[in-house]
Structure formats: C-alpha cells, structure tokens
C-alpha cells in the first residue's frame, strides 16, 4: 500500500515542481523589462543665410545758428547850417578864363584810333559823317554827340538797311601794304549807325584782327550808301553790324 502511494506521489510532486518552475520562469519573463528599440540619430544640415544689418538711420542735421548783425543806431540828421550873411567884399579875380556860354554844336567828321599792332588811323575830329569834315578846329568842349531825330533798334524795324553800291566798293586800295606783304588776311566786324537818309553817321570797330585791317575797313565802308531802315514805312536811324572780309587774290 505504501509503495503504491509513493508511486502516485512521486510523479505528482515532480509535476508540481515542474509546473512551479515553469510558473516562476513565466513570472520572471513578465517582470523583466523589454528592451527599448534605439532610434537612429538624424543630422539635418540647413544653410542659414547671414543676418542682414538693419540700415542705420540718417544722421540728424546739425542745427545752424543764425548770426544776426547787431542793430546799428540810427544816425541823427545833421544840424541845419545857419546861412552866413552876404559879404559886401567882392571876390578876388581868378586866373581862369571864363567859359563860353554858347550852345554845343555838331561837328562833322569822325575820330577813331586802332589799338592793333598794324598802326593807327586818325580822321578829323568830330562825331558824324553827314558831311565833309570842317576845315577849322573847334573846342572839344563845344562838341556834342550826334543824335538822330528818329532812332529804332534793329529788333524794332520792319526793314533793315541794305547797301546800295556794294559792288562798287574796292577793297584793294584800302588793303594795308604791310598786311599784304605779310600775307595777312582777316575779317573786320563793324557797327554802323545808319541815318534815316541812308548815310553812315557813325562807325565802330567791334572786332579787329590786326595788321591795320580794322582802320582800313572803317575807312572803306564810308564809300557805301545804304537804304534806310523803316518802321511801318517811316525811315528811321538804326545800328547794324557789318563785316568786311580782307582776302588776298
């Protein structure tokens, strides 16, 4: 009977011990922490643009100080001089000769000097070419400038003066000998005052190339006769430029 019981208990104990060992193993597996999978590290390279500097504000303008001049005191009016009583003593005689009280007169002719190196050109003293120069010299203080009765500027006239005998002007006899010898050529610009009757009242040399061409041109142009300038059909005096070309044949 005991043998039978031992035979039954032995397998039973073995089975219990085996199941207990299995249970302990299962519990140990359940209690053991599971390994955490490692995520691979990823590196992302980003190109960051350089930071731009904010524009600096413009500098503030420097305030300017206004300089004011000190006020000058107003000058008092000078005292009124007291007139002296008339003296009964006559004034002493002077050595100066008394000036003539006659009215100034118009002297015919023209005076002009050339500042060029070619020489000088002098005509009878006067201020107009309306007629031949006078034979008797007059006091320069008695000479008054010529003044036309009706004068208009070139911009005001309707018809400018035109030379009437331009082809008859012979410049060869007025060409300076020294300039011809040196082969010198040039243009002379004149300013002519043409009177209302077409005559030349005044000649001014505006541009002189030298070698005596300026005085020669002023002398030669007096051979010309012009048609007068007109304003609404009325003849007037005016001033016009005139150029004379000196060329060698």
Image (cartoon, rainbow, N blue to C red):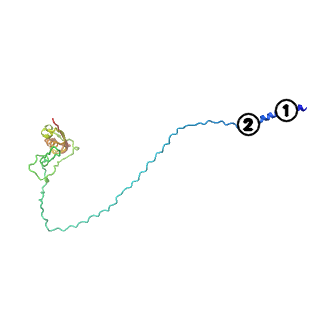
Give the residue at mark 1: 10
Q: Is residue 30 visible to us here?
A: yes
Question: What is the x, y in percent for residue 178?
Answer: 14, 40
Quadrant of the drawing holding the C terminus: top left
Farthest-out residue, left = 135
Give the residue at mark 2: 30
Under circle 1, the secondary element is: helix
User: How many residues crowd mark 2 within 10 Å: few (<14), some (14–19), many (20+)?
Assistant: few
Q: Are marks 2 and 1 in contact (CB under 8 Å)?
A: no
153 and 171: which is toward the camera: 171
Q: Is residue 218 left or right of residue 75?
A: left
First in sequence: mark 2 vs mark 1: 1
Q: Which mark is residue 55?
A: none
- Residue at 77% over, 36% down: 24
What whole-number distance in Å separates the C-alpha atoms at marks 2 and 1? Answer: 30 Å
Question: What is the x, y in percent for residue 28?
Answer: 74, 37
- Residue at 78% over, 35% down: 21
Under circle 2, the secondary element is: helix
Question: What is the x, y in percent for residue 185?
Answer: 18, 38
- Residue at 85% over, 32% down: 10
- Residue at 73% over, 37% down: 30
User: How many residues crowd mark 1 within 10 Å: few (<14), some (14–19), many (20+)?
Assistant: few
The quadrant in which residue 20 appears is top right
111 and 113: which is toward the camera: 113
Q: Is residue 80 left or right of residue 71?
A: left
The quadrant in which residue 213 appears is top left
């Amino acid at each position: 009977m005991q043998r039978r019981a031992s035979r039954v208990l032995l397998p039973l104990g073995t089975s219990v011990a085996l199941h207990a060992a299995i249970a302990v193993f299962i519990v140990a597996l359940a209690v053991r922490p599971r390994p955490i999978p490692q995520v691979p590290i990823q590196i992302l390279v980003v190109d960051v643009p350089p930071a731009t500097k904010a524009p600096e504000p413009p500098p503030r303008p420097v305030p300017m100080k206004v300089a004011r001049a000190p006020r000058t005191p107003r000058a008092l009016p000078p005292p009124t001089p007291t007139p002296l009583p008339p003296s009964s003593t006559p004034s002493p005689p002077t050595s100066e000769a008394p000036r003539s009280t006659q009215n100034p007169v118009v002297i015919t002719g023209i005076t002009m000097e050339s500042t060029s190196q070619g020489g000088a050109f002098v005509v009878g003293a006067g201020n107009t070419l309306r007629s031949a120069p006078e034979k008797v010299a007059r006091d320069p203080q008695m000479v008054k400038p010529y003044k036309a009765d009706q004068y208009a500027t070139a911009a005001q006239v309707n018809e400018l003066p035109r030379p009437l005998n331009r082809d008859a002007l012979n410049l060869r006899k007025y060409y300076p000998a020294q300039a011809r010898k040196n082969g010198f050529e040039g243009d002379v610009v004149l300013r002519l005052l043409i009177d209302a009757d077409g005559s030349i009242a005044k000649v001014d040399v505006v541009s002189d190339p030298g070698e005596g061409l300026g005085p020669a041109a002023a002398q030669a142009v007096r051979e010309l006769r012009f048609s007068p300038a007109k304003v609404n059909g009325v003849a007037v005096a005016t001033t016009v430029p005139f150029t004379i070309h000196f060329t060698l044949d």
